[in-house]
Image (cartoon, rainbow, N blue to C red):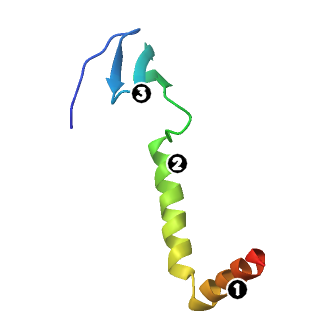
Amino acid sequence: MLVLTRRIGESLVIGDEVVLRVLDVKGDVVRLGVDAPRHVKIHRQEVYDAVSAANRDAAARATDADADALREALRRAKG
């Protein structure tokens, strides 16, 4: 893990498209601004973890019947 020290108003650049700026620091709370293209997905870690867990659970519950039904629906949609 890379650890950097930044002050309010200072930034760091990730790749060529993402800029992370420190907006404010109050006690143990840091406000960050992220400037990134729309195609770059940005999530808070707890939201990302919850969505990933839900997706894993859904995939684990999927059955062959679900896959067969999806294939049939796609076949009908193609006409």
Q: Position of residue 21 (x, y in %)?
A: 42, 18
Determine whether 62 is above or below 41 in the image. Answer: below
Task: Give the vertical position of 17 relative to 5 (above or below).
Answer: below
Q: What number is the disc on residue 47?
A: 2
Q: Dot 2, how many residues are within 10 Å of its Cα: few (below 14), some (14-19), or many (20+)?
A: few
Residues under numbered marks 3 and 1 in contact, where contact means CB atoms less than 8 Å apart: no
Q: Nearer the N terminus, badge 2 or badge 1?
A: 2
3 lies left or right of 72: left
Q: Quadrant of residue 1?
A: top left
Q: In the rendered structure, which disc, 3 or 2, sits on the residue that comes first in sequence?
A: 3
Residue at 53% from the left image edge and 66% from the top image edge: 55
Give the image location of residue 32, x and y in percent.
46, 22
Q: Is residue 47 left or right of residue 14?
A: right
**Amino acid type, mark 1:** Glu
Q: Secondary structure at mark 3?
A: strand
Check the image and name the residue furthest to the front.
79
Q: What's the mark number on residue 72?
A: 1
Query: Exactly how many numbered labels are in the figure?
Result: 3
Kind of residue at badge 2 = Val
For residue 21, above or below residue 59: above
Evaluate whether residue 26 shows in this view: no
Mark 3 or 2: in front is 3
Residue placed furthest toward the left: 2
Image point 55% across, 81% down: which residue?
A: 61
* Labels 3 and 1: the sequence-earlier one: 3
Q: Which quarter of the rendering shows the C terminus? A: bottom right
**x 57%, y 81%: residue:** 62
For the residues marked 3 and 1, what is the alpha-carbon distance in whole angstroms? 41 Å
Q: Which quadrant of the view contains residue 71?
A: bottom right
